[in-house]
Image (tube, rainbow, N blue to C red):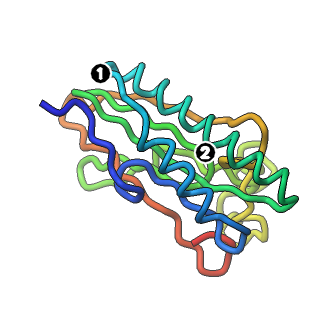
C-alpha cells in the first residue's frame, strides 16, 4: 500500500515562480526538486516537518542566489498533505488551497500580500482590495528572506468533508501568472 503520493507541481506541491522576476521559474524548480527528494514518514506530523525542512533548504538556496545576483528571486508555494482522514496545508505567498463542501468552495489559506496585511490591520476594506495598486505585491514567499515563514493549518476530512483543492492565482495585469 502506498502511504504518500508526491505529485508534480500543480497537483501536490504548488510552487509558482514570479512572472517578471529574474529566475522565478528556477526558484520554482528548486522547490520542486527539494520536495521530490525527501522521504516522508507515515505520520502526517512527521511528513509536515520533513516538508518544512525541505522548503527551508530550498529557501536557503534561493536566498543565496538572491543575495549573489542582487535581484529578487522567489516563488510562492502551497503544499497539501493528506493521510487517512487528516490534512496539513503549508504555504508562503498567494498560492491558494480551498475546501469544497456542499457545493461551496472555502478558501483555507490567506494570501501573503501587502493588501491582505492592510485588510488584517483594518487599513483597507476588502471591497477596495481588488483594485488596490499593491494587490499583487507579495509580503512573503520562498527565497526573499533568510528565514522562511510558512503558515500551517491542519484539519480533518472526517464527516464527509471533501479534499481541499489547490489553485494558482492568475493575474494578467500584475506580476504573477
Tag 1 secondary structure? loop
Could you tell me residue 55's position as x and y percent? 57, 38
Compared across the picture, whether 145 is left or right of 171 comes to: right
Residue indicated by mark 2: 92
Q: Residues within 10 Å of mark 1 (few under 14, many from 20)?
A: few
| Residue farthest to the bottom, as pictured | 173
Name the quadrant containing residue 171.
Answer: bottom right
Q: Write the residue at 49% across / 53% down.
A: 96
Q: Write the residue at 24% across / 38% down.
A: 161
For marks 1 and 2 on the same chain, the one whose residue lies earlier in the sequence: 1
Q: In the displayed structure, would residue 160 be above or below residue 115?
A: above
Compared across the picture, whether 25 is left or right of 133 comes to: left
Residue indicated by mark 1: 42
Q: Residues within 10 Å of mark 2 (few under 14, many from 20)?
A: many
Q: In the displayed structure, would residue 51 be above or below residue 63?
A: above
Q: Write the residue at 37% across / 49% down.
A: 12
Could you tell me residue 149's position as x and y percent? 68, 35
Numbered circle sitting on residue 160: none
In front of the other: label 1 or label 2? 1
Q: Disc 1, disc 2: CB below 8 Å?
A: no
| Residue farthest to the right, as pictured | 70
State which quarter of the image contains the C terminus: bottom right
Tag 2 secondary structure? strand
| Residue farthest to the left, as pictured | 1
Could you tell me residue 98's position as x and y percent? 40, 50
Compared across the picture, whether 132 is left or right of 153 comes to: right
In this figure, what is the number of numbered marks?
Answer: 2
Could you tell me residue 1's position as x and y percent? 12, 30
Marks 1 and 2 sit apart, C-alpha to C-alpha, by 24 Å
Amino acid at each position: 500500500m502506498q502511504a504518500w503520493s508526491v505529485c508534480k507541481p500543480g497537483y501536490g506541491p504548488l510552487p509558482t515562480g514570479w512572472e517578471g522576476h529574474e529566475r522565478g521559474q528556477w526558484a520554482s524548480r528548486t522547490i520542486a526538486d527539494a520536495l521530490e527528494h525527501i522521504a516522508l514518514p507515515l505520520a502526517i506530523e512527521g511528513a509536515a516537518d520533513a516538508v518544512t525542512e525541505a522548503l527551508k533548504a530550498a529557501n536557503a538556496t534561493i536566498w543565496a542566489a538572491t543575495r549573489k545576483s542582487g535581484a529578487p528571486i522567489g516563488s510562492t508555494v502551497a503544499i497539501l498533505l493528506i493521510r487517512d482522514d487528516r490534512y496539513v496545508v503549508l504555504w508562503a505567498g498567494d498560492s491558494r488551497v480551498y475546501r469544497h463542501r456542499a457545493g461551496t468552495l472555502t478558501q483555507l489559506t490567506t494570501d501573503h500580500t501587502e493588501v491582505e496585511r492592510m485588510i488584517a490591520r483594518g487599513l483597507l476594506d476588502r471591497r477596495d482590495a481588488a483594485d488596490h495598486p499593491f494587490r499583487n505585491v507579495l509580503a512573503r514567499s520562498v527565497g526573499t528572506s533568510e528565514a522562511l515563514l510558512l503558515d500551517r493549518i491542519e484539519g480533518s476530512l472526517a464527516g464527509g468533508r471533501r479534499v481541499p483543492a489547490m489553485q494558482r492565482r492568475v493575474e494578467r495585469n500584475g506580476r504573477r501568472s
